[in-house]
Image (tube, rainbow, N blue to C red):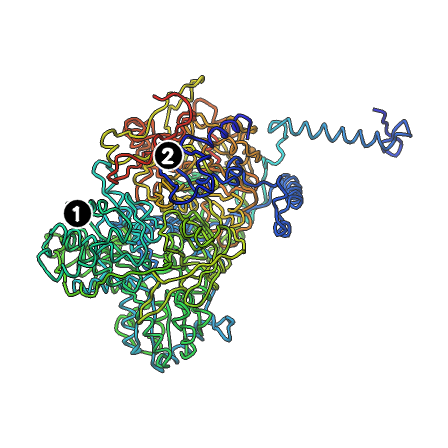
Amino acid sequence: MHLRQNSTGRWRSLQGRSDVVSRVRAWMMIVGICTTTLFLSGCKWQFGWGYNQGYAPEQPLPFNHELHVGLHKIQCLYCHNQAERSPNASIPALSTCMNCHLLVKAESPFIQKLREASDKGESIPWVKVHMLPDHVKFSHSAHLAKGVNCEVCHGQVEKMIVLKQDSDLSMGWCINCHREPKYNAPLNCSTCHH
Amino acid sequence: MSEINKDIVQKQTQPEALQPEALQPEALQPEALQPAQFGYWKSLAQWNQDSEFQKAAAQEFQSSPLREEELTEEDRDGGWARREFLKLMGASLAMASTACIRRPVQKIVPYNKAVEEITFGLPNYYTSSYFDGAESLGLLVKTREGRPIKIDGNPKHPLNGGASSTRAQGSILSLYDPERLHGPRKISSGTAVETTWAEADASIVAQLQKGGVVVLTGALNSPATTALVKEFTQGFKAKHVQYEALSSEEIREGQKASYGDEAVPFYHFEKAKIIVSVDADFLGTWLAPTAFTRQFAAGRKDPATMNKLVSFDSNYSLTGANADIRVKIKPSQQVDVVMGLAHEIVVKKGASKFAAQSSVKSALAAFAETPTKLGISHELFSRLAEDLWKHKGQSLIVAGGLVTQTEAAKDLQVAVNFLNSVLENDGATVDGRSGFSGLKASTKAIFELIEEMKKGSVKTLVIHGVNPNYTLPSAAGFREAVKNVGMIISSSDRVDETGTVSSYVLPDNHPMESWGDAEIIDGVYTIQQPTIRPMYDTRSFQLSLMTWAKIAKVGGKRISSSDSYYDYVQAIWKDEIYSQVAKAAAKGTNKAAGFESFWDQALQTGVVDLGKQTKSSPARTFKLDALNSVKAKSASGLELVLYPTVNLGDGRFANISWLQELPDPVSKICWDNFAAVSLATAEKLQLKEKTLVELVIGGRSVKIPLYIQPGLHNDVVTVAIGYGRTAAGKIANNVGVNAFDFAKIEKGALIASGLIVELKPTQEAYKLACVAGNATMEGRKIVAEATLTEYLKEKGANNHRHKTFSIWSGHQYNGNKWGMAVDLNSCTGCSACMIACQAENNIPVVGKKYVLQGREMHWMRVDRYYVGNPENAEAVFQPVMCQQCDNAPCETVCPVLATVHSSEGLNDMTYNRCVGTRYCSNNCPYKVRRFNWFNFTGPVEKPLNLQYNPDVTVRPRGVMEKCTFCVHRIKAARNQSRLENRELKEGDIQTACEQVCPAKAIIFGDLNDPESRVAKIFKEEPRAYGLLEEFNAAPAVRYLTKIRNNDQEKRFPGTEGASHNKGGHA
């Protein structure tokens, strides 16, 4: 490559005559190599692009899993009580929150906000943290029935002040577990895609 | 198509049975036709080896973006030209690449108060009922997160069981129809203006109080609505008229003349060994086709003792297509058929209690020469009579429906009743005491009403559930008569044809938003339970009546004591149905539970059966006087036959895209109606397919596309009703021609059949979207049939095995291995499975343009093959879905592994991996793969998207798709079994097509379970065969040969063998 960087930081050809031609050629080559690498590398080399690992959005109310799960030892299934029988774990209804918060910490401004919504018949628009594409069908109940506990996928929620996505939820990550002999899990495409 | 495949195809297009050199178009003269020349064929183009057809058959895809020259100017304007397509592709790529950095924020909004019965992600089921003016079903509606997504039959229902019809399946889309009215409308000078309920109520009540009120409804089979209308009409001194375009009036009149009581009887096809149908399409459109199909198929499960269906058919109906012996007739011969048979039995054989009566003999004398008149052999006719007499008490003669609405409609019914009485069927297979009590609609009544309207004595007309401005011929004068009516109130869910001439359109709730009830046949009650809260500002018709009665302070005690129609329904059930149950219980030892628990139980099971059917019904005395009016008639000229189709019926569901795109079971044409004639008639009158013809009737002429229907009588032209709507919505408007308009009114009765018409050719080109040419299997013998005689000699007749071998050891299936069996002897081709599949699997509708290009998306199709020559073609139906081959040809060619084999024997299709090479489709021997040429699902108008099944991915453009054996249902059942800590068992999983099938022709199960029904069929059933077995694709679907109970020794030559290409025979 007959290229070098000049003082202004721009690439210039050493041979002025075919300046434009070689510059275009060089760029084409770079772009070509990048594209080919991207195409050939497949999932492994995508550096987690498109995955939301570590995603911890701000929620409308600062719900603290560490406090509820870690300190007060409330079971996951107390609130996410549909996880055992449904594909969806579901966010609990406000009435579930109010079971305790009718009395507990009633003076907190956040709880007052919750109570207000509850009294008005409104809801809280929580921000979804764990997102799977529409063509992936995941079932919480199937995994729980097989003895796969919440923390296997969701990590140590009892230590999360702000809930974050612990795993990358990529297909490779799913398959890793499904391949383990101890789970005896199916590896068919239609297990998740239908 | 690869070179190898091309080679195979070239060999296969000329199987032994089809000899192209003998079938040049000039050889198409009827007299030159010998059945020996024919195998199975799907269309006339295939039959005469049309060069265009062969060209199309050689290509997997009839059109592709690469063949741009085929695009018309309209295509380019439509924005789908190739350049545009690429531009869009580029745009979506760019969007995809920016979006994948961080996904858009999604919100989860939980309930305020947890709802007890809803678990997110799991369906809830509610019992309900369905009624379309003729057929009524008990339903089980599947809802997800509060929205109904699928309708199925209630397995506990005594009539339809778990089965339902195409129209019931499709009716869910009418709930989400974007064109439903969102609130009450006042129509002033042709335009609909928004109004409020209070405003409308005030002006309507003021008008009602002026008197001259008529309530015009469809047939009412709801005890509560009937009582309410009665109370309302008494309160306002109003008149109640029940009208249906497809009424059963002629049956009631015939019953009254013959036996004295005016009711539509119930028929027991399951008890009949021999069934003769004279233009009664009981498997397709007549009375209760779902229940009748169930009964009929039950009598064919064991071929050794199967029933025999003989059909005398003016139209090529679904019933005719399923007949063991089909005889083509014209409408003017209907009476002759029945009386001719009676003559054979009573006069010739001297059998039955009527044989001695001279009046009977003289009435029958005119029908001695019926076989000659029909052009059939005397032997066939007398053998049929012999058979009928042999099975007296176990035979059944039926006639009825629009096709029998000739001038002699009542006479035909009398003749049928007479023959049933001769054969001692009355009380055995015909239950005249407890029948379809709800079918009381009358066409004569509406003509009387129109007369009154013209006189000006009707001041207010309240219309519910019918659309007379569309279903009445213009000769009826409804449009002129409405001008004399002070106020017309329509309760339609849109401003339909009748709505446009109304003063108010007050939208009724959809049946799935309202409480209600139904008495389907005497003593079988069903509650109609709402499954969703009213989506818009609508009000049920019944509540409207109650509201008006309350404002005017008229009406009876029940209206004043009920706050809602729900209260009213409960009150009726308490007074009329519960009281009977309690009385019956009081006689026994059991004490009846209270009303509350009775009601809850009725909701839970979905049906209350008072058991009136099980009691034996004594035979009634036939009044011989009735026979006096039955006279032989002769007619000449081309006779018109109007018929309802399986998909659209009377046209009330015309705006449901699924039903419009569902190919008609026999003609396989969708998105149009047409005039069908026989091949000989078309040649005689020089009418050509793909052109319009001029249909001249009563001095008027209408242009309509021509279709040549094999197996039609030469003097018949058939046209379907239900098309040609003008104010139904975007989908239905101006699709086809309104054939109701061809009907004639004579002596206050509607004549829809047997009218003399003329056909004239025109030069105008018009293409019909017929799917019978798409996905052809190119003359390979796919269906297997045998006659009963052959079957009794050898159970596996016409079905031979091939020796196959593989150099590969094959897959191991250690857990479940899914398989399916389809009994061609039960399948009637009703196509309910296609709609059920469409509803379950979010299958898009593509529209006529793309059907013409072979791009329909149905995952399963029902192929209709003709056999024999076009003059007397018989039909065979074969549902074809993905065969889930063990050695699947599609899997080996996918370059991106988007379709791979599962450990349970399924060919999994992974949409997100598919890049759309379409190699799999090219390599599929069964042509079951469907490609999303465009984003068919994307532009679906809201709220139609609410119907989508959340368990099935909605596929975007560029992706291949196909039947999955309802893998999501397999998964759901497995999850459920795991939660219940048990193994999956037979019956846990039903595919959508299996569930809906009224004939129970489809069986799904685990081949690794030796006790399962499919495993037994695969292993033991001699009738079972796989499609193209000799290629050793090892499909996981087996078909059971169809058996024809037609007294013949053999099927037509050239039809032996399931598939007969190559490979050694075992």
Whether residue B813 is visible here, answered yes or no, is: yes
Task: From the viewer's side, name the closer residue of A152 and B597.
Answer: B597
In the image, residue B345 above or below residue B992: below
| Left or right of residue B522, residue A125 in this image | right
- Name the residue tied to disc 2: B974
Chain at tag 1: B
Give the quadrant of residue B542.
Answer: bottom left
Kind of residue sitting beneath label 1: Gln
Q: Which residue is mark 1?
A: B394
The chain letter under disc 2 is B
Q: Nearer the viewer, residue A183 or B1061?
A: B1061
Residue B688 lies, in percent from the top left, at 48, 51
Location of residue B132 with respect to A20 vertically, above or below: below
Mark 1–mark 2 Cα distance, whole angstroms, equals 45 Å
The secondary structure type at the circle numbered 2 is helix
Point out the residue furthest to the right here. A16
Q: Are marks 1 and 2 in contact (CB under 8 Å)?
A: no
Residue A166 visible in the shown view: no
Q: Amino acid at mark 2?
A: Arg
Q: Which mark is residue B304?
A: none
Which of B947 and B113 lies nearest the eye of the viewer?
B947
Q: Compare marks 1 and 2 and give the one earlier in the sequence.
A: 1
Q: Secondary structure at mark 1?
A: loop
Closer to viewer: mark 1 or mark 2: 1
Looking at the image, residue B854 lies above or below residue B742: above
Percent position of residue B1042, x then y: 31, 37
Q: Residue B958's spot in the image, x, y percent?
A: 57, 39
Horizontal side, residue B434 vs residue B533: left or right: left
